[in-house]
Image: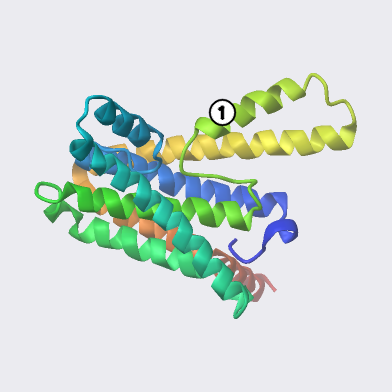
Amino acid sequence: MFKHYASSRSFKNNLSIASLLSFTAGMVNVSGYLSIRQLTTNVTGHFAFFVEQVDRLKIWEGMIYLYYILFFLLGSFCSNLIVEYMLKRSKDISFIVPVVLEITLLSMVGYFGDSLVMNHPNIIAFILLFTMGLQNALVTKISKSSVRTTHLTGLFTDLGIELSQLFYFTIPAQRVTLINSIKLRLTIILFFFIGGVVAGVLYFRLQLNTLLIASFILTIGLFWNKIRLEWILIKRKLFN
């Protein structure tokens, strides 16, 4: 799932990673908001809040929103820095390292987060925004900008454009490419929504431990190809 890069990735590869990461982002989005009442998967709202505080001349109070934005940016920066470094040394695992880092950080928040909610909620926001910047940069890089998973504004914009293009794209090859792109965007939106619903249901029982489940799902995705291969070999032994 994380092995192929850019032009070597098939539509199925992108669909798989889009489903996994958008589901995770949906879980982070709802878990973060329910725990600390802050957006933790995108920075559009934080930028608006920052500008509002500046307009009111409450620059110091507004700095926290700037920090949120910077942590998302830092996550994106670190993600690509790691990938570029690893591509020159071990291409096969270059995209795996940021995922392992994301799993580690989400697990830390899931395990220790409830003790931080009351007195240090901003630490939770910083870490979650960092992980989502990390994830968004990773999937953008690996799919050559075909997939983004942490926020939906751009997705709905692209989806609206592509739906309108259905009226004009008549060449079969063009329509196949367009329909695949629409399927990809709908998949991301759907799994982001499902991840949010799942997190909403689990949060009232597990609190921030919900993020441990998100980490577990990411771990399965990380080893999915190996798990799938082992399952195929087991079936062959059983039925041959």
**Residue 106's x, y, as percent?**
32, 58
Q: Say which residue appears at 27% left-offset and 48% top-offset.
A: 125
Quadrant housing residue 205: top left
Which residue lies most toward the left here?
119
Please identify the quadrant where the N terminus is shown.
Answer: bottom right
**Residue 26's x, y, as percent?**
41, 41
Decide if residue 95 is in sight here.
no
Q: Is residue 102 left or right of residue 8?
A: left
**Residue 88's x, y, as percent?**
62, 77
* Above or below, 189 relative to 218: above
Q: Amino acid at mark 1?
A: Phe
Q: Circle 1 sits on which residue?
A: 156
Q: Is residue 200 left or right of residue 158?
A: left
* Above or below, 13 relative to 179: below
Q: Residues within 10 Å of mark 1 (few under 14, many from 20)?
A: some
* Above or below, 168 relative to 192: above
Q: Is residue 180 left or right of residue 133?
A: right
Q: Nearer the viewer, residue 92 or 141?
A: 141
Which residue lies most toward the right here?
171
